[in-house]
Image: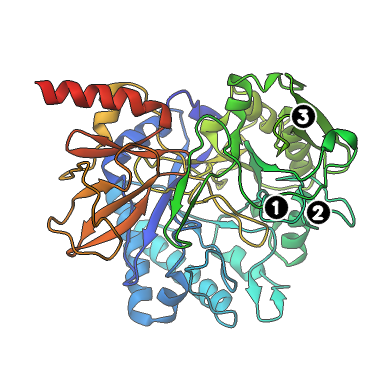
């Protein structure tokens, strides 16, 4: 997370701790936590939480909470992790209670929401008895509508406010390539009769109307956009951003790459464009001006910008400083606790975080003592905004946590690999006791392996994010963050940006010569 000014955030959620069936959870980059926490806390009073779950890490939560033994293990695992790692709390990103998120997930429409409430009550009790009343934080990442019941979203979630400090609404991934038509990734308002009828405003209304205290409500902002390929020339109707689109996802910015979804059993690009790369790659010459062949439009209803490339027929919905400020100021006008962002590493010269910190002109005031929000896969509150940042190098952290799709019904978190461009950082990212060679014969999930703890890239040439871990004598599928690929490095592997491939290969060859 080099280059991120954590003094602009009040809280950072580090993603993700991934729960196992037995109620324990693991954070693959635990070895890097001391360095991560040092960076976060160097900003001053910024608090650090571990986010548990995420889009690809919510498979077992429903079943864990149903069983008294695994439930108790889950509770104790959270308490112990906060204690041993000196964290300020736990963020739970269950996607989603009472409804299907990722297709591998277990869920129980009847019991998930009441089970979650009961669990949070007990977690609050254990935190208070172990650390002192209110000493540790509990926050939740939630979708744009309240937790589900058999009859739909709950109309009363007021009890949750007694046990959690904040909830962070993931008010993005509302529109995307999974829909029949193009539409905004994160609309401020939605347009009647067009696109998905959900938005930043409607998500705030939904949670407040269901009784959740607005002073504990944090609204989410996306520092990225989503692209898709349209079926007709949008330049002929630039006043209408809703056009038929293909479901095949195009490659996004320079950091995007095909990633393997072990649940779906398929590989695809994410199609995401980080704000910084819209600027660095020259798509936007300044925050409000596109360079050819891109055409920039502003939608006055959704209060968001969008781009169209006539040559490639790519549509791109995103947020810029103007749209971010509109949302932040609105959150302040509604009396919310703050805003959160996904994610801190995606900004460019603080253009978006400074807009997010507007918060009705109160961005430089100190946040309340109990304020907490998420820094995208690092959940981090700014003052008073927040951002989720993922610290994972070789694992899916949230964000991706959030793979390529996260709709209002299924928001995902895109994972972020810790930024590192020098060789020492790359070497530090290598898994311990790992090895990799170019022989990929037989590298299939579930097939036998010989050396527990061994890692191998599915594609040793660095064109895929998938890798395998030898665990219990069988190959277990894993994946690098969506924007990264698995790279062979000497007798190890490392997840890095595709642009690292040539550097890694050069160093690898040099080591072989020594």
Secondary-structure class at tag 2? loop
Q: Residue at x 33, y 51 (%)?
A: 27
Q: Earlier in the sequence, mark 1 or mark 2?
A: 1
Residue for point 57% across, 32% down:
253
Q: Residues within 10 Å of mark 1 (few under 14, many from 20)?
A: many
Q: Which residue is mark 1?
A: 174
Q: Which mark is residue 322?
A: 3
Q: Nearer the viewer, residue 335 or 29?
A: 29
Q: Earlier in the sequence, mark 1 or mark 3?
A: 1
Name the residue at 56% across, 65% down: 101
Residue 90 image position (x, y, % from top left) = 44, 54
Gap in Å between the C-alphas at discs 2 and 3? 22 Å
Q: How many marks?
A: 3
Q: Which residue is mark 2?
A: 195
The image shows residue 161 at horizontal and vertical percentages of 61, 63
Q: Is residue 58 above or below residue 389?
A: below
Q: Vertically, is 196 above or below 367?
A: below
What residue sits 35% from the left and 37% below the top?
Answer: 462
Residue 450 appears in view: yes
Identify the element where label 1 is drawn.
loop
Q: How was the colour assigned to the protein in this rendering?
A: rainbow
Q: Nearer the viewer, residue 382 or 401?
A: 401
């Amino acid at each position: 997370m080099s280059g991120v000014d954590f003094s602009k955030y009040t809280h950072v959620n580090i993603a993700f701790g991934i729960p196992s069936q037995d109620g324990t959870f693991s954070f693959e980059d635990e070895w890097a936590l001391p360095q991560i926490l040092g960076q976060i806390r160097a900003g001053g009073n910024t608090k650090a939480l571990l986010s548990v779950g995420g889009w690809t890490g919510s498979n077992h939560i429903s079943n864990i909470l149903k069983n008294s033994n695994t439930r108790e293990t889950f509770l104790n695992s959270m308490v112990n992790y906060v204690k041993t790692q000196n964290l300020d709390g736990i963020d739970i990103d269950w996607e989603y209670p009472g409804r299907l998120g990722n297709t591998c997930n277990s869920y129980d429409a009847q019991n998930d929401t009441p089970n979650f409430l009961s669990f949070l009550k007990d977690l609050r009790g254990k935190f208070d008895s172990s650390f002192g009343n209110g000493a540790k934080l509990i926050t939740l990442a939630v979708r744009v509508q309240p937790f589900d019941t058999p009859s739909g979203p709950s109309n009363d979630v007021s009890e949750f406010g007694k046990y959690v400090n904040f909830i962070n609404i993931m008010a993005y991934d509302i529109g995307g390539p999974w829909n029949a038509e193009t539409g905004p990734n994160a609309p401020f308002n939605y347009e009647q009769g067009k696109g998905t009828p959900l938005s930043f405003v409607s998500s705030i209304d939904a949670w407040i109307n269901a009784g959740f205290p607005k002073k504990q409500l944090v609204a989410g902002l996306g520092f990225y956009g989503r692209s898709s390929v349209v079926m007709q020339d949008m330049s002929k109707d630039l006043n209408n951003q809703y056009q038929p689109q293909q479901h095949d996802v195009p490659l996004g910015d320079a950091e995007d790459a095909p990633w393997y979804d072990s649940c779906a059993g398929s590989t695809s690009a994410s199609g995401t464009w980080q704000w910084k790369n819209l600027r660095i790659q020259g798509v936007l010459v300044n925050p409000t001006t596109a360079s050819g062949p891109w055409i920039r439009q502003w939608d006055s209803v959704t209060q968001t910008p969008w781009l169209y490339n006539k040559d490639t027929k790519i549509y791109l919905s995103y947020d810029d400083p103007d749209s971010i400020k509109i949302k932040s100021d609105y959150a302040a006008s509604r009396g919310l606790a703050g805003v959160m962002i996904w994610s801190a590493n995606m900004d460019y010269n603080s253009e978006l975080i400074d807009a997010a910190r507007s918060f009705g002109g109160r961005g430089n005031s100190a946040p309340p003592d109990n304020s907490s929000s998420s820094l995208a896969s690092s959940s981090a509150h700014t003052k008073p905004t927040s951002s989720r940042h993922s610290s994972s190098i070789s694992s899916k952290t949230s964000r991706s946590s959030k793979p390529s799709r996260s709709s209002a019904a299924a928001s995902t978190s895109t994972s972020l690999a810790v930024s590192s461009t020098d060789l020492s950082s790359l070497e530090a990212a290598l898994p311990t006791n790992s090895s990799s060679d170019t022989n990929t014969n037989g590298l299939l999930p579930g097939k036998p392996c010989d050396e527990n703890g061994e890692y191998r890239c599915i594609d040793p040439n660095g064109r895929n994010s998938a890798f395998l871990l030898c665990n219990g004598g069988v190959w277990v599928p894993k994946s690098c963050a969506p924007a990264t690929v698995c790279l062979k490095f000497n007798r190890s592997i490392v997840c890095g940006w595709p642009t690292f491939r040539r550097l890694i290969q050069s160093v690898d060859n040099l080591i072989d010569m020594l």
